[in-house]
Amino acid sequence: MALADNNAITLLLVLVAIALVAQLLLESRAKKKREPKYATKTLLKCTKCGYTIETDYEPGDFVGLIKRRCPKCGEPMIVYGIYDIEIKEKS
Amino acid sequence: MPGDLSDYIVQLIWIILFIMIFTGASQRIQMKIWAYDIRNKLATINNYLDNDKKRVEEAMKKLGFRSPSLIISRYINYFLIEPVSIEPTDIIRRLDSILTTRESFFKDTLKREHPALGRYERSLIESSLEILSALNYIYKVVRHYLLLGEKHNNWILLMQLELVMPEIMRIVETYHKSLDSFINGKPIGDSAGPLLASRLIQLGNTVSTRIMEDTLIAETWLDNRRVFIIKAEGPGSNVGRPGKVLKKLVEELHGNVDLIITVDAALKLEGEETGEIAEGAGAAIGDPGPEKIAIERAAAQHEIPLTAVVIKMGLSEALYTMKKDIYDAVERAVDYVRRIIREKTGENAVVIVAGIGNTIGVTP
């Protein structure tokens, strides 16, 4: 009877140890989040009518740069803002 | 009989475990596991450093530098010795002198190596080299403590290092990923202050602008107040000298200033939202001391109210390309600052607004 109890305790200890290791592994895997991806955008604003366009960032862009003509009124457009937006991946 | 054998095995395991505990063998095993993990992370830091060195080298070659690797190796080993603090007299002046020497070294060396290079491009290379320098320093310090811990079997040292490694890796990854913004000249989260200053200049009726110590002063009329806007001169990677310039400006105005507002990006606490705007008293500026004390002294000497407005963000957000959340927060902060000016001063009052931070990708 005592022998059977000992074996049962050993088995229980082994199972608890396996469960703990499994829990640790699962936890460490769950922590690896997929990092969000970003795209840099340039916001252009017309100096006269205030019309805005968001375009892809091009090297050399900076806030305050006069870049192109407004498609609505033909006046110069300045780079009003440069920022990163998150790209939502299709799952 | 099989039951007896299993009893012996279990007892043997317990005896071995006890021996390991009392002889310190378990600690040695633990130490090896920590050292293995730190070594892996150190290899990652080294890998980042090598990749970033190659990127900066390529960028420098494209700009026409003849021996970029030599310049890089000279830059990344440049160090700074802090002034004696046991005797605090003149410590700010001494610290300022040391910081100026360091800044001049970075600027002048690049100028000498490539005199034809424009200021904008030179500032981007300077900042990229500063990132390399920071990564190199972290790599060397971590390696030092790892080797020291192993050499003296100092498990406490290794344990401490292992515990701080996640934080160190977070900083290393932030520096590594921020290189893209600095090489390309994109505005970063820390550019929030200069961007706000730039907006105020656009909104107001600007009377004059001038440059003093890489810092722009724009005199403008905004909401019927005479507003002096201070920001680093853009669009290169530059933080300017906002403190010194503000102090000189206050002296020029004979202290006749009704309000000083400093606007800066501030590190948020865990749980706080990115882009949160907060108002407080004091100078919002994260320099080692000389610039901040200059603002505080100017305000205290002439009893000018000193208001701080901060835009909250994480360390990585401050160094990466400006996120849309932060950009939107800057737009909100513009209205916030204008409301403060209207609430705290009357018409025709003189106000100074300093947009603190790196003006990379933001002009004027």
Image (spheres, coloured by chain):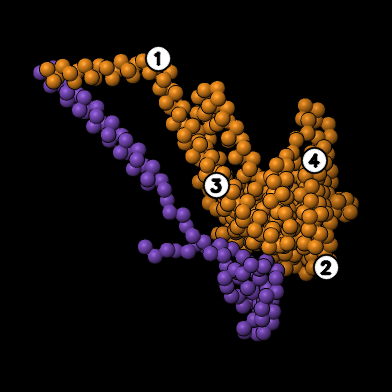
Chain colours: A purple, B orange
Point out the tag, 3 or 1, that comes first from the N-terminus.
1
Asked which quadrant contains residue B136, the reply is top right
> Where is mark 2, residue-wise?
B207
Point out the tag, 2 or 3, that comes first from the N-terminus.
3
Q: Secondary structure at mark 4?
A: helix
Horizontal side of A27 relative to B147 (left or right) equals: left
> Where is mark 4, residue-wise?
B98
Q: Mark 1 to mark 4: distance in Å?
A: 52 Å
- Chain containing mark 1: B
Which residue occupies 66% across, 70% down?
A79
- Chain containing mark 4: B
- Chain containing mark 3: B
Q: Nearer the viewer, mark 2 or mark 3?
A: 3
Contact (Cβ within 8 Å) of mark 3 with mark 1: no
Q: Mark 2 to mark 3: distance in Å?
A: 51 Å
Q: Secondary structure at mark 1?
A: helix
Q: Mark 4 to mark 2: distance in Å?
A: 36 Å
Residue B20 lies, in percent from the top left, at 38, 18
Residue B350 lies, in percent from the top left, at 81, 58
Q: Secondary structure at mark 2?
A: strand
The type of residue carrying mark 4 is Ile
Q: Mark 3 to mark 4: distance in Å?
A: 32 Å
The type of residue carrying mark 1 is Phe
> Where is mark 1, residue-wise?
B22
> Where is mark 3, residue-wise?
B47
- Chain containing mark 2: B
Q: Nearer the viewer, mark 3 or mark 1?
A: 3
Residue A13 lies, in percent from the top left, at 24, 27
**Residue closest to the eye, B109 or B218:** B109
Point out the tag, 3 or 4, that comes first from the N-terminus.
3
Asked which quadrant contains residue B359, the reply is bottom right
**Residue closest to the eye, B156 or B61:** B61
